Image (tube, coloured by chain):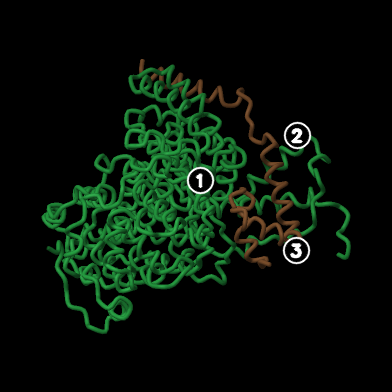
Chain colours: A green, B brown
Amino acid sequence: MNFLSEVQLESKFGPFVAFEKNLGFIPNLLRAQTHLPRLIEAQASLESAVRLTEGAIPRVQKERILLGVAADRHDTYCMIVDSKVLSSLGISEGQIDDFLNDYRDADLSASEVAMLDFCLKLSRCAPSVVSEDIGRLRTYGFEDKSIIEAVVTTALAIYRCTLSVGLAPEPDFEPRKLAKLPRTAIPSSGARSGGPLNGVHRGAKTKGPYVQAPYRSSETFAPYATLYKTHGFIPNFFSAQTLRPDLLAAEVEAVVAILLPEDVLSRLQKECILLAVSAANLNSYCVAVHCNLLRGLGMPSEEGDQIAVDHQQSELSESDRALLDFAVKLGAHFSEFSRDDVVKLRTLGFTEEQILECEAVTALNDFSNIVQMGLGVEPEFEPPFAYQQNKVHLSPLSDPPTTEGFVGSHSTTAIEDLDASLVVKTQAGDLEAFEELVRRHSRLVYRTLLAILGNSEDAQDAMQDALSRAFQHIAGFQGRSKFSTWLVSIARNAAIERLRNRKNEESLDECVLEGDREFRPRQVRAWGDNPEQAYSKLEIRQLIERGIMALPAKYRIVVMLRDIEQLSTDDVARQLELSVPAVKVRLLRGRLMLRELLSPHFAASTKEPGR
Amino acid sequence: MITCDEFFTELGDYLEGRLSPEVREELELHVSQCHACYVLYDSACKTIRIVTDSGSFDLPPSVLDPIIDRVIAKLRTERA
């Protein structure tokens, strides 16, 4: 029945030995991944930390979560494995049958039933999980450590189910007992009135993350150091799990083994898979993160946005679009997935290794989507505007709670609509409409130019160039980004051309991971309470303008757009086609350099005591 | 308590108000006990406030309008 072929691994292969020891057998789900042993290692690392270790939740309870989720998804393969494991832990066949018939009527404690209610809600409809669900678990005495473990165990169940659908391994044991079971082993949500499974609680979401997250330093916590290398920052996804460093470390290990190697699929392809499947799972958080990572890998932001909205309309190659079709079906619409999907990828020239890796990336994505929604991890980036617009149509839930955290999206929509009608008129040749558009955004354009070029004469000349170019090329504007973003990108290119023509070229590029030492403060005298009061408004303005103009261009433009133009960090990143972490680094450096320049004017004249 | 290096790593997000309550508490504890980091944080906050409120580069329409007028006039001529 296997969809993919297998190869022989040596019998001493570490993860196989560990499974043999812990479970008494090596699951065929692992054997089906022998083309890429590092994927088996990734899964083994997750299973070992989440499932096989006694944690905050008893081992048996975790096994029942795995079995419950598998049964709810009608995943026969995982049900057979998980029943066997439960039975090896001393649970009788009769008890397992009772559990599968109805876990609420299987002599489990009220707290375990509440935990299973939560885990099934999370696996079945993750976007509907709200902080009240976590509150309910707390009333049953569960502490945050246990709650994280329950969320991650559910995520592991989904990871295994996604792989089992994609690989279709042979059952490890005879499905004798399970054949008698009713089609719907776990009662559906509608059967329980008043329970937490009754759909989306609109407006009920309070801000996440739902659990405590103690501080960890990248200097002492190895997984953070790894993440700095792989992502350039610590995604909130991980920092929300610091209460369970063991689980966090296993997840980072899996990420490194599955996502980083480029020998099979490229990192770009994998990020596209993560983006498309997260979008299909309505996970705004992961969409925003992967859009950002794609931008960091050099993909234009409009292209990333398009993949989130509809990858079929993107500029990707036909085979890459087919790869995303495959991943989205497996990750988000698994009941429609079949052997034909695997055959189709083979026909397009994908190898066994590539198909296998695509499945593992998809499984990892589903895992992350579940953890993010279960813990209410707050986004560090805004999801793309176009995705937010489209999501309403994609969503089976009329108002997914995850969109509520994004402040200001309504006002953006209004401005966008206003621009859109003027853009259409301009595209039809209406110069007055163009004039209106340009006046609306002229300050933003001018300040961008001033920030790049560093003097007003050049900025004014460049502005004329940029506006003429914008009118000439307006037909090519397809509305995938905001009009203002498009206009600024034209202005930016015009400015960069001018910069290149200068003799002493100032670069806008740099490696964002370079050291911070040179940006450490030298002025350590304290400032007074309102130091600006000693100066007139005009003097302050001149001081600031001179200070900003004295910054290197790459910092000047970020400070200008963030602190003068007051764009959000995400918008600055979008305007400059930089990743958000790169913007954050430049912003902090720019601000500290400016602080250094202003310090002689604003530092208190009296010395600090003891200095 | 966290070190000055760790404080510096988180400073950008601290200034942007993007930290979780737990991390923010760590940083608040640090600035309450480290004078150099207190001065850095306090003056950086004030820098941002002064820059934001300064009205810098706030151009009167008299600067930008003529540029836009020139561009529109040129485009109109080209079309004619």
- Residue at left 29%, top 63%? A96
What amino acid type is highlighted by mark number 3?
Cys
> Does A496 appear above or below A43?
above
Q: Mark 3 belongs to which subunit? A: B
Left or right side of A169 for A428: right
Q: Which residue is mark 3?
A: B34
- Residue at left 74%, top 57%? B38
Q: Which residue is mark 2?
A: A538
Give the distance between the C-alpha atoms of the residues marked 1 and 3, in whole angstroms: 39 Å
- Residue at left 60%, top 26%? B63
Give the distance between the C-alpha atoms of the residues marked 2 and 1, in whole angstroms: 52 Å
Which SS class for mark 2? helix
Q: What is the quadrant of residue A108 in the picture?
A: bottom left
Left or right side of A312 for A605: right
Q: Are marks 2 and 1 in contact (CB under 8 Å)?
A: no
Q: Which residue is mark 1?
A: A132
